[in-house]
Image (tube, rainbow, N blue to C red):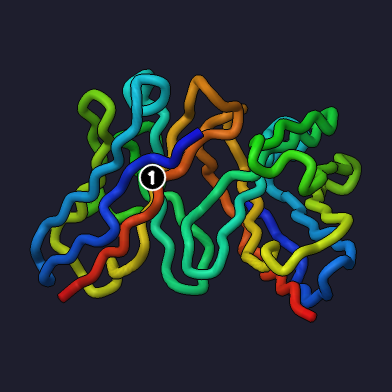
Amino acid sequence: QSALTQPASVSGSPGQSITISCTGTSSDIGDHNYVSWYQQHPGKAPKLMIYEVTNRPSGVSDRFSGSKSGNTASLTISGLQAEDEADYYCCSYTTTSAVGVFGIGTKVTVL
Amino acid sequence: EVQLVQSGAEVKKPGESLKISCKGSGYRFASYWIAWVRQMPGRGLECMGIVYPGDSDTIYNPSFEGQVIFSADRSISTVYLQWTRLQASDSAIYYCARQPWQGSPPDTWGQGTLVTVSS
């Protein structure tokens, strides 16, 4: 299956809001609400930030929020902070594969 | 606390075999699928496939079928990723990750195992 499409990079200044998109198809993102987002700092394992499109695990800042429209899911980071600088990946259940599909990843830079 | 703990970094030569492990704790290990995820240097995440510790059922991403072997030992809450003949292109970080249900995005990740294959 093809990877989900994400912008290669997104940047913003401290305090600003940024949004990362994740575009799939009607077989994955467009078919259901099983989309997650992960944050990965250099040399670290991915960390779950959002699950089932909009839900935050316990301990994740409410500055992170998720949404979906059609075949595109989005992650918004509000009040951008230096510690948010990392790579972000989306992941979706897909009806065409039992193993799921990841996005290509987005590097977030805090200016 | 749900945790996945992976075995340590490995340095191997091309043609050698390797088996790395992932041990779960804090939940009913046999009841959740475990995904193996590859991250090549400077690249993104790729799901290689999944294994169900309850009955050792496996599903491979077609891109990795025949290249690796998944296995499980539910008695010690551990799953394995194995290569019979490593290639330099297998150099990567390998993560195990728990899927709440088959095919779902993972909710818990291991710390990763760095595999370096070099002559």
State the image coordinates of residue B30 (x, y, percent, origin top left). 77, 34
- Mark 1 — residue? A90
State the image coordinates of residue B25 (x, y, percent, origin top left). 72, 50
Q: Choose between A54 and A23: the one closer to the eye.
A: A23
Determine whether, in the image, residue B20 is placed left or right of residue A54.
Answer: right
**Placement of B7 over or under A37, stated as above or below:** below
Residue displayed at 51% across by 73% down: A43
Instruction: Assign a secondary structure to mark 1.
Output: strand
Instruction: Give the image quarter of residue A111.
Output: bottom left
**Placement of B1 over or under B30, stated as above or below:** below
State the image coordinates of residue B58 (x, y, percent, origin top left). 76, 32
**Placement of B103 over or under B22, stated as above or below:** above
Name the outermost residue toward the bottom.
B119
Q: Can you see residue A59?
A: no
Residue displayed at 54% across by 69% down: B41
Q: Can you see residue A6?
A: yes
Determine whether, in the image, residue B3 is placed left or right of residue B20.
Answer: left
Residue displayed at 21% across by 27% down: A69
Determine whether, in the image, residue B41 is placed left or right of residue B56.
Answer: left
Q: Amino acid at mark 1?
A: Cys
Q: Choose between A3 and A67: the one closer to the eye.
A: A3
Instruction: Give the image quarter of residue A32.
Output: top left
Instruction: Give the image quarter of residue B92.
Output: bottom right
Quarter of the picture holding the C terminus of chain B:
bottom right
Q: Choose between A48 and B114: the one closer to the eye.
A: B114
- Chain of the residue under the numbered disc 1 shown in the image: A
Residue displayed at 67% across by 64% down: B89
**Number of numbered discs present?**
1
Determine whether, in the image, residue B113 is placed left or right of residue B20.
Answer: left
Dot 1 alpha-carbon crowd within 10 angstroms: few under 14, some 14 to 19, many 20 or more: many
